[in-house]
Amino acid sequence: MARVPAVKGLIPAGGSGTRLRPITHTSAKQLVPIANRPILFYAIDHMVAAGITDIGIVTGDTGAEIRAAVGDGSAFGATVTYLPQEAPLGLAHCVALASDWAGDDDLVMYLGDNMLQQGLVDFVARWRAGRRGGELRFDDASADPPAAQLLLAEVDDPRQFGVAVLDDHGRVAGLVEKPADPPSRLALVGVYLFDRRIHDAVRAIEPSARGELEITDAIGWLLAQGHRVDHEVLSGWWIDTGKKDPLLECNRLVLDLVEPAVLGDVDAASTIEGRVVVDAGARVTESRIRGPVVIGAGAVVERSYIGPYSSVGAGCRIVDSELDHSVLLERASVEGVARLTDSLVGRDADVRRTPRRPRAMRVMLGDHSSVELPDDRT
């Protein structure tokens, strides 16, 4: 009877996050919060929910920050191994780094800045279904089990993505990167399941024109060797949080799911409407909070309005201001601002009013920065 491989989790978290600068000049993009929780934490949660508790995280220049945030994984019910990567050399290079650690076990790779509504439970369960009862079993007539399983999503404009080519039987026959004439609308989501043959594939391929080992080339090698590659089309939403507007949209989608909980201090002159979370230690006075909103521990909100789809990080200070559809990282300060909307404000950043103000402001403000907004009232 063949040994049933375990499934280990691999999270690439070494990218530099150039599309989220200036936020990522001083912070790992995977630790930017969604609903006051780092993006990376959702990936770990999804793995643990799918029964994957042995997780490797590939880290780069921000490795120390990620280690400090995640620790040994015990807070998530997991064991975390860190795999340092000296430079962002591609997703297939991440797999190569994990080769000794993964051994003969299967590997699910989940990009650390992706967010999926459906999680991984069904995707992993389908992969494991052929391995029930302690022996390899597959529902396909082929004796060769799948070497890989891809998560795909139907997209409106496939030209922006890696796209799957399907054969007449609905099987993955190839992958095309950002095709001018897409062969399908099925884009790679950034979630992959592999068996041990992926390590042969990453050893066999060469760096691409941009100097990286591409995971699409490794999957192409598997197909060229005659190995089977299965796929699943996801249900629900999928967002790459690498830019400000998608990140704010993801924050909106996650906030739609929050359960109200007012644990901090809210005075009688304040109004709480809808799904609002006020963490313990936060203080709200003479203000109106209209959910969905989360307000982190130790935050102070005074004489202000916080509108829907806003996440206010721990230790933030909002005074005499209005904001909505925005994400404020820890200890950010907004004071005297008539309206702040569609904004991402970094840690310890300071936004305040000066003479001659416009009606509304949209900003993406990095950590430890300060900006003064004009005020037309004087």
Image: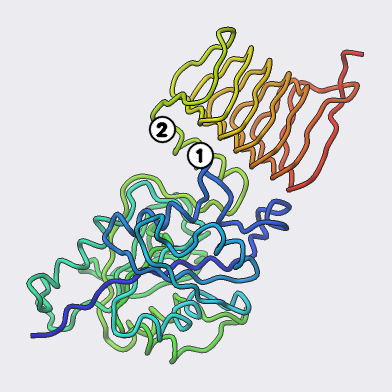
Q: Which residue is drawn at 63% across and 65% down?
A: 62
Going by the numbered disc 2, the residue's amino acid type is: Val
Q: Position of residue 78 (x, y in %)?
A: 36, 62
Q: Where is residue 226 in the image (x, y as percent from the top left)?
A: 27, 86
Report the residue at 72% width, 22% height from top.
319
Q: Could you classify mark 2 by the number of other residues whose Cα lies within 10 Å: few (under 14), some (14-19), or many (20 or more)?
A: some
Outermost residue, bottom direction? 204
Quarter placement of the C terminus:
top right
Residue at image point 39% right, 82% down: 101
Q: Where is residue 314 in the image (x, y as percent from the top left)?
A: 60, 38
**Mark 1 sits on what residue?**
35
Rounded to the nearest angstrom, the CA distance separating label 2 from label 1 is 9 Å
Residue 61, which numbered label? none
Residue sitting nearer the eye, 330 or 224: 330
- Image quarter hosting the N terminus: bottom left
| Image location of residue 352, percent across then percent down | 81, 29
The residue labelled by disc 2 is 258
